[in-house]
Image (cartoon, helix red, strand yellow):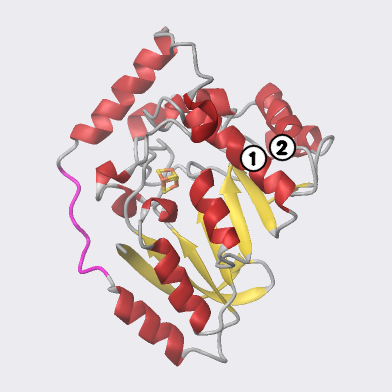
Amino acid sequence: MLLGGIVKTSTLDYPSLLSAVIFTRGCNFHCPFCHNIDLVRLPRNQSDTREPKETREARKTKDTKDKREKRVQKAHAQIELDPKEPDHGPWPQVEEALAFLAKRRGLLDGVVVSGGEPTIQPDLPDFLAAIKALGYPIKLDTNGSNPEVIENLWHLGLVDYLAVDLKCLPQNYSYFTNDPFISSKISQTIDLVLSSGRNAEFRTTCLAPFIDRDIISDLARLAAGPIPLFLQRYRPERVLNPSFMAPYPQPSQTDLEAFRLLASRYLSCYLR
Ligand code: SF4
């Protein structure tokens, strides 16, 4: 496991529980509005860009190269090639994190594992099992790109609460990754979460060009069901790709409330 930090106490990250938050390093996305810059820059190439099982046979069409896609690819290239980001280590080690959690038994109610993107780390099940062995319930934050990993973690009983980002409509995820199969992976994750009967939430950061009134409506329709959707504000400070984000204003409170009302037609929706 590559860890990126530990927040020793949080009342905000795990619903109703006093928790510690453990951040993993590395992400398979490059969201222009990401604030976890130091966690995302490091190991870049752990993304599983294989076609998911369900679509290996079915996929027939090729991605079109329209203007928007070219612009997105240019934005990806700018991020990939930026050599200036410093390494903010030393990073916490797994043993250190587990020792901390062992010491806090009885004082903390739960543990949040966040990122970066935790599901790209091959030894995530072992790490979560070690946390479970200390008696903690676990909340996992994910960008939803690895439905097979999520399913396996649930199967192993290693995740008690799942938070899945819905960044935009599945067909528009080329803003965030070059994975040609991401659309079907995100759709698969949404279906998995909706049919799971597990404790979970969807989360969406609200800002153009990823979210507008039509998009939030379509997204909520896609995720309609028992899982709540939390709408989050965009904070423009120190983001991964400021030049990409520069033309897009922060949505107003009125915009956010309008998004919430539109989404509430299909599922329980809250502003966070
Ligand atoms: S998925 Fe999360 S951690 Fe990864 S780049 Fe996007 S916002 Fe940052």
Q: Amino acid at mark 2?
A: Ala
Residue 61's place in the image compared with 87, above or below, is above
Q: Looking at the image, which residue is at 15% across and 43% down?
A: 84
Q: Is residue 90 above or below residue 167?
A: below
* Mark 1 touches mark 2? (CB < 8 Å): yes
Q: Nearer the viewer, mark 1 or mark 2?
A: 1
Horizontal placement of 12 versus 213: left or right? Answer: left
- Residue 104 locus on image (x, y percent): 48, 89
- 251 in the magenta segment: no
Residue under pointer 1: 190
Question: Which quadrant of the render holds ligand 1?
Answer: top left
Q: Which of the two discs, 1 and 2, labels the residue nearer the N terminus?
A: 1
Instruction: Between residue 61 and residue 204, name the one nearer to us.
Output: 61
What residue is rendered at 32% in x and 65% in y?
3
Which x, y percent locates residue 137? 59, 75
Which residue is at the front of the view, 155 or 28? 155
Q: Residue furthest right?
A: 265
Q: Is residue 204 left or right of residue 45?
A: right
Left or right: where 187 falls relative to 261: left
The single residue placed furthest to the front in the displayed view is 57
SS for tag 2? loop
Residue bounds of the magenta highlight: 84-91
**What is the quadrant of residue 239 in the picture?**
top left
Q: Is 85 colored magenta in this rendering?
A: yes
Q: Quadrant of residue 125?
A: bottom left
Task: Find residue 223 and name its label.
Answer: 2
Specify the amino acid type for callout 1. Answer: Ile
